[in-house]
Image (cartoon, grey):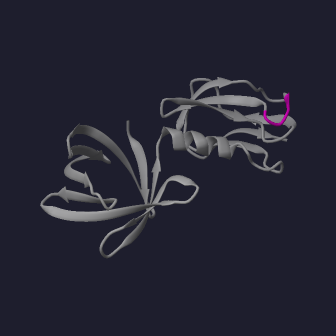
Amino acid sequence: MAVEVKIGNRISWVDLVSHEGNLLEIDIDGKIHKVDVMHTADGTFSILSNGHSYNIELVPYPNKPKKYTAYTLYQEFEVEIIDAEARYLLNRGANNVGSSEKKVISPMPGKVVKVFATEGDEVTKGQTLVVISAMKMESEYKAPMDGKIKKVSVKEGDTIEGNQVLIELE
């Protein structure tokens, strides 16, 4: 399963194509790379790729799963792995917005599975308004506050983009 890997400001899609011992075939943004990766006793990773050797130490952020500081001999990078679990947690966090927020927004691309609200409906905070399928997971998007539905911008079966407004409240 492909994951999004964010290194600094760059985001790439990474997928493990094959794995045999330390030899990996990895698809990074559509380009196949063959690498030899070894996790050493001191906790670093030794990577051989295209005749070059790299040593990388990954230090996890406290209380931030799948986020690391990567140290090489000369450089330091922030690395974040955004897989289906991380996307789900981001989605849940996105729905815990303050009561002044009047929009339900999808943080990632996906497909609308079910819409439970229509314009003019009275809703309560936490009520499920729409279900989105993304990265083989379904996520419920809930009303951020009590209110009345002003606009429903999607319908079942729609393909949506990241940061797209799904529903607006008055």
Magenta-drawn segment: 122-126
Quadrant of the image containing the N terminus: top left
Residue 79 in the figure: left or right of residue 26: right
Residue 131 in the figure: left or right of residue 49: right
Quadrant of the image containing the C terminus: top right
Residue 49 locus on image (x, y percent): 18, 57
What secondary structure is the magenta-colored segment mainly? loop
Residue under the image location 30 percent in, 73 percent down: 73
> Outermost residue, front direction?
41
Residue 144 in the figure: left or right of residue 5: right
Q: How many marks?
A: 0
Q: Is 10 one of the magenta-colored residues?
A: no
Residue under the image location 35 percent in, 46 percent down: 14
- Where, by quadrant of the figure, is residue 164 drawn? top right
Q: Is residue 9 above or below residue 21?
A: below
> Outermost residue, left direction?
51
> Outermost residue, bottom direction?
74
Residue under the image location 32 percent in, 62 percent down: 42
Q: Is residue 144 above or below residue 69?
A: above
Residue 163 locus on image (x, y percent): 60, 47
Residue under the image location 73 percent in, 30 percent down: 129
Residue 142 locus on image (x, y percent): 73, 35
Viewer-nearest residue: 115 or 99? 99
Q: Is residue 87 above or below residue 73?
A: above
